[in-house]
Structures are given as structure tokens and as C-alpha cells.
């Protein structure tokens, strides 16, 4: 009878480098979020700066969204197979190369290509969480994973005002030189401080599955992101959605018949994993509306009767308390998960998001109430986003943690893209002329808050349906995978 492989004890690299493992990975996550948001202050001026159309400029955002959605599960799978630190370093390097390209060029085609390269950084967080799972003992894992999850919000809150300040006082290329330098620091720091994980899943990389997923996601997300501009009933959008359904159905069939699939759909079909992915999609939708609507509302002209006429720098500062709150509340999320389980933390977080939107509906005229409501939403997002990877880590084998977390991040991305399209559709249908220019009405903003709040409540209810620890123990007895055996040994020790 074949003897089981010995279970490796997770330990961070000893000495000085080991002490920097968690901060360096967190820095990478913050840097990724900063890189995604720095282009936002440039969008109104990029058509003039690049001598291109607003439609072409919008692709600097769309390209990052599409490449990030495609590459996150792909690089997660590659990390499980070829080494997580190696793939993480490559993703940060691609992000840095893209930033250098933006710093050197004003050609819109080059900028779009560069932003697509930067989309690879979307895999930084799931890869880092997987590394933390492999290297940290259970008693340290929860707080580290919670901190890693919160870096997305922290980086976004820091990136917007930072980019706005640079753009306001310096040449716009300076911003990308700055992010290039930060990216180089991130690549070097990861290579120096992070130990390569020994946990691997052998096999051949699923090239056909990768191409199928890429084609299906591009059709789906392109349709969602461009529906407002091209028309939801236009032939192009309907064709994209039809192609997405056909390609993803064929991809699903191929994955079930592949020995080493890109995404283990049998694993996804387990309620503990599948419902976690559904909750991630709903939470991503609910969270993203906060940033989208808040930024537009506070910048609306005072002539609307509700707008505050704030600059982009002042707008970024309004969102900054939410980023600080995410940093402060990530340890609380870990403690709740340790005491009550991550599904309870997720349910509480989604409910808190709904409470934040209730505050926004109650008062969206006073600046302090706007900041308070946005900060409450950010607090709930911290709890929810910190719990999601913990749910995944407890439900999948150790050698599939990076790819499984990559799929979870993908679901969040789809939720955010859908939220962006839904918010745009609501605001477009609720406008009134101000100075001859159509501007969203306050009712439109409140309706967007209402939709996001309802989705948050659905996410909370979904979280409570995820099987708890009893289901986990049952799966252990059934021999569900390497993760369960390894964690039981560690917890028993």
C-alpha cells in the first residue's frame, strides 16, 4: 500500500527576510490596486493628451479589466504548477513593464497595450494568499490573509488622491515613472523576502482550457463593459453575449473531460466552494457601486442642488477614510472568523455594506454623511473580502489554492464589471439638464444605492447557506483532499 507523503510544516523564511514576508506581499497587493486606479484622474484629459477619441481612451480601463479577468485564474493555476513566488514575481514584472511603457509613450495604442500588461497584476492577491497559506502556521494565517485581502481597498483609496496630486502639479508621465519605480521595488522585495512554496500540483498545463476561458471571458466582459456605449440591444452586444454562452458552454464540457483542467469544476460544484464564488460575485457588485457613485456624486456641480463640486483630489480624500478603515478592521475580521467561522464574517460584512448604503439613502447631501456612509461600506467590504479567501482555503486541496482563489477573484471582477454597467444604466436613465448638460439626478444616485444595498443583503443571505465547519469535518472523513489532511495534522500539532 502506498504511504502518504509527509506533511511539510509551514514556516516563513527564518531571520530578517522571514519577518518581511507578510509586509512585502501586502505591499504588492497595495501596489496592484494603486496601479489600477492611477489612470482614473487622467481619463478626462487623455483624449487631448493622446490626440485620440474618448472611446479609444476608455480602452485604457477596459483592457486592464479584460486581461486581469483572463490572467487571474490562468496565473493562479500556473502558480500551483510551477511555483507561486515565480509567477507572482512575473506578474509584478509585467505590471512594471506596462508602467514603463506608459511613461515613455503618448500613443494611445501603446497605452492600451501597456494597460493590458498591467492587468496581470490582478493575480497578485490570490497568489500571495496562497503563499501565506503554504508558509504560515494556522494561528498566524487568518490575520495575514485578512490583511492581504484588505490591500485592494487600501491601494484604491491611496491611488486616487496620489495620482490626482501628481497629475495636477506634474507632467502626467511622471505618475507612471513613479509607479514604475514602486513596481521595481516590489519585484525586488518579493524576490528577496518571499520563500518559494514547495506545494505544487504536477501535470501538463491546460492550454486548450486557457484559450477557451480567455475567449469566453473576453466576450462576456466586453459585452458587459461596452453595453452602455454600444447599446444593450445592438447586434454587437447580443452577438458577444451569444458567443460567450456558446464558448463557455464548450469550455465547461472540455474542462470536465480533461485530466488536469485549468479550473477543477468538480471542486467548484461543491456547495462550500461554489456558494463562496457566488457570494464573491454579489459582494463585488455591492462594493464597487460605492466608489463609482460616491466619486460622481461629490464632483457634481452645486447647481444640481445636491452636488458639492469637489475636485478629483478632494474626491480621493473623501474615499481615503475608507481605505484607512480597511487597514484597521482587517484584524477584526480574522478574529471573527476564528471565533465564529468565515461564513459568519462574510454574512456580517455584507450586512454592514447594506447598512452603509442605508446611510447613503438617508442623507447624500452633507459631506460628513457621505464620508460616513462610504466608510461603513468600506468596513463591510473589509470583513467580507477578508472572509472569502479563508473560505476557499478551508475548502480546496493545498495544491489548488492559488487557482481556486484566482477563480474567486475572477467572480469579484465579474461582479464589479456588472455593477459598473448597472450603475451607468441607472444614472443614464435618471438625468436632468444643468447648464444645458444632462447630469444624473439625486434620485438616480439613491436608486443605485438601493440596488447595491439589496445585492449586499442577498450576498449576506448567500453566505449563511454556505456549509459550516460540520460540512468541513464531513468532507475530511470522506477524504476530500490534501488540504484537509494537512490542516488537521497542523491543528492537531
Image (cartoon, helix red, strand yellow):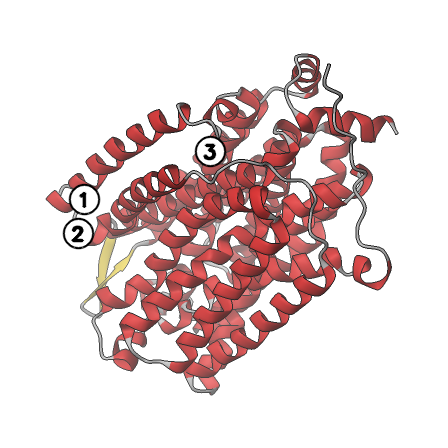
**SS of the residue under disc 1:** helix
For the N terminus, the quadrant is top right
| Residue neighbourhood size for the residue with mark 2, other residues' Cα within 10 Å, grouped as few (<14), some (14–19), many (≥20) | few
| Residue neighbourhood size for the residue with mark 3, other residues' Cα within 10 Å, grouped as few (<14), some (14–19), many (≥20) | many
In the rendered image, the residue lying farthest to the left is 235
On the image, the x and y values in percent for residue 472 come to 67, 20
Residue at 69% in and 17% down: 476
For the C terminus, the quadrant is top right
Dot 1 corresponds to which residue?
237
Residue at 22% in and 74% down: 52
**SS of the residue under disc 2:** helix
Dot 2 corresponds to which residue?
230
**Mark 2–mark 1 contact, CB under 8 Å?**
yes
On the image, the x and y values in percent for residue 379 come to 62, 47
- Report whether residue 429 is seen: no
Q: Is 379 situated above or below 399? A: below
Name the mark nearer the viewer: 3 or 1.
Answer: 3
Name the mark nearer the viewer: 2 or 3.
Answer: 3
**Direction from residue 427 to residue 492 in the image, left or right:** right
Dot 3 corresponds to which residue?
263
Considering only order in the chain, which callout, 1 or 3, is on the residue closer to the N terminus? 1
Residue at 41% in and 24% down: 256
Q: CA distance from mark 2 to mark 3?
A: 32 Å
Considering only order in the chain, which callout, 1 or 2, is on the residue closer to the N terminus? 2
Residue at 80% in and 54% down: 13
**Direction from residue 301 to residue 239 in the image, left or right:** left
On the image, the x and y values in percent for residue 248 come to 31, 33
Considering only order in the chain, which callout, 3 or 2, is on the residue closer to the N terminus? 2
Q: CA distance from mark 2 to mark 1?
A: 7 Å
Image quadrant assignment for residue 452: top left
Amino acid at each position: 500500500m502506498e504511504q502518504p507523503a509527509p506533511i511539510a510544516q509551514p514556516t516563513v523564511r527564518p531571520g530578517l527576510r522571514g519577518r518581511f514576508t507578510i509586509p512585502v506581499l501586502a505591499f504588492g497587493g497595495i501596489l496592484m490596486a494603486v496601479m489600477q486606479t492611477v489612470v482614473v484622474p487622467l481619463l478626462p484629459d487623455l483624449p487631448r493628451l493622446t490626440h485620440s477619441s474618448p472611446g479609444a481612451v476608455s480602452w485604457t480601463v477596459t483592457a486592464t479589466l479584460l486581461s486581469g479577468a483572463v490572467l487571474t485564474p490562468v496565473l493562479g493555476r500556473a502558480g500551483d504548477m510551477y511555483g507561486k513566488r515565480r509567477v507572482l514575481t512575473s506578474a509584478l514584472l509585467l505590471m512594471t513593464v506596462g508602467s514603463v511603457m506608459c511613461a515613455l509613450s503618448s500613443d494611445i495604442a501603446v497605452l492600451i497595450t501597456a494597460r493590458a500588461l498591467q492587468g496581470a497584476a490582478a493575480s497578485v492577491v490570490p497568489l500571495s494568499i496562497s503563499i501565506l497559506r503554504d508558509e504560515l502556521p494556522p494561528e498566524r494565517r487568518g490575520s495575514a490573509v485578512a490583511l492581504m485581502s484588505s490591500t485592494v481597498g487600501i491601494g484604491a483609496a491611496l491611488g486616487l488622491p496620489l495620482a490626482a496630486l501628481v497629475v495636477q502639479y506634474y507632467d502626467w508621465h511622471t505618475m507612471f515613472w513613479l509607479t514604475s519605480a514602486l513596481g521595481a521595488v516590489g519585484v525586488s522585495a518579493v524576490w528577496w523576502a518571499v520563500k518559494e512554496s514547495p506545494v505544487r500540483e504536477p501535470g501538463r498545463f491546460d492550454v486548450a482550457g486557457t484559450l477557451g476561458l480567455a475567449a469566453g471571458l473576453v466576450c462576456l466582459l466586453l459585452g458587459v463593459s461596452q453595453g452602455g456605449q454600444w447599446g444593450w440591444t445592438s447586434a454587437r452586444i447580443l452577438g458577444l453575449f451569444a458567443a460567450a454562452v456558446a464558448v463557455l458552454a464548450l469550455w465547461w464540457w472540455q474542462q470536465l473531460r480533461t485530466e488536469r483542467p485549468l479550473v477543477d469544476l468538480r471542486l467548484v460544484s461543491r456547495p462550500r466552494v461554489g456558494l463562496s464564488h457566488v457570494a464573491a460575485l454579489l459582494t463585488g457588485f455591492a462594493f464597487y457601486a460605492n466608489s463609482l457613485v460616491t466619486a460622481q456624486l461629490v464632483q457634481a456641480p452645486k447647481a444640481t442642488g445636491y452636488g458639492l463640486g469637489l475636485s478629483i483630489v478632494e474626491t480621493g480624500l473623501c474615499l481615503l477614510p475608507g481605505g484607512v478603515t480597511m487597514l484597521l478592521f482587517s484584524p477584526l475580521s480574522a478574529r471573527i472568523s476564528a471565533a465564529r467561522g468565515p461564513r459568519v464574517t462574510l454574512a456580517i460584512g455584507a450586512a454592514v455594506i447594506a447598512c452603509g448604503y442605508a446611510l447613503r439613502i438617508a442623507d447624500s447631501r452633507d459631506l460628513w454623511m457621505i464620508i460616513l456612509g462610504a466608510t461603513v461600506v468600506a468596513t463591510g467590504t473589509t470583513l467580507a473580502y477578508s472572509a472569502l479567501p479563508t473560505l476557499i482555503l478551508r475548502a480546496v486541496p493545498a495544491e489548488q489554492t492559488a487557482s481556486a482563489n484566482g477563480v474567486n477573484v475572477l467572480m469579484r471582477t465579474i461582479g464589479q464589471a456588472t455593477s459598473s454597467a448597472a450603475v451607468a444604466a441607472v444614472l443614464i436613465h435618471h438625468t436632468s439638464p444643468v447648464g444645458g448638460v444632462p447630469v444624473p439626478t439625486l434620485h438616480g444616485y439613491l436608486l443605485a444605492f438601493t440596488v447595491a444595498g439589496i445585492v449586499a443583503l442577498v450576498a449576506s443571505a448567500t453566505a449563511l447557506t454556505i456549509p459550516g465547519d460540520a460540512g468541513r469535518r464531513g468532507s475530511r472523513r470522506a477524504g476530500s483532499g490534501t488540504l484537509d489532511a494537512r490542516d488537521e495534522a497542523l491543528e492537531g500539532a
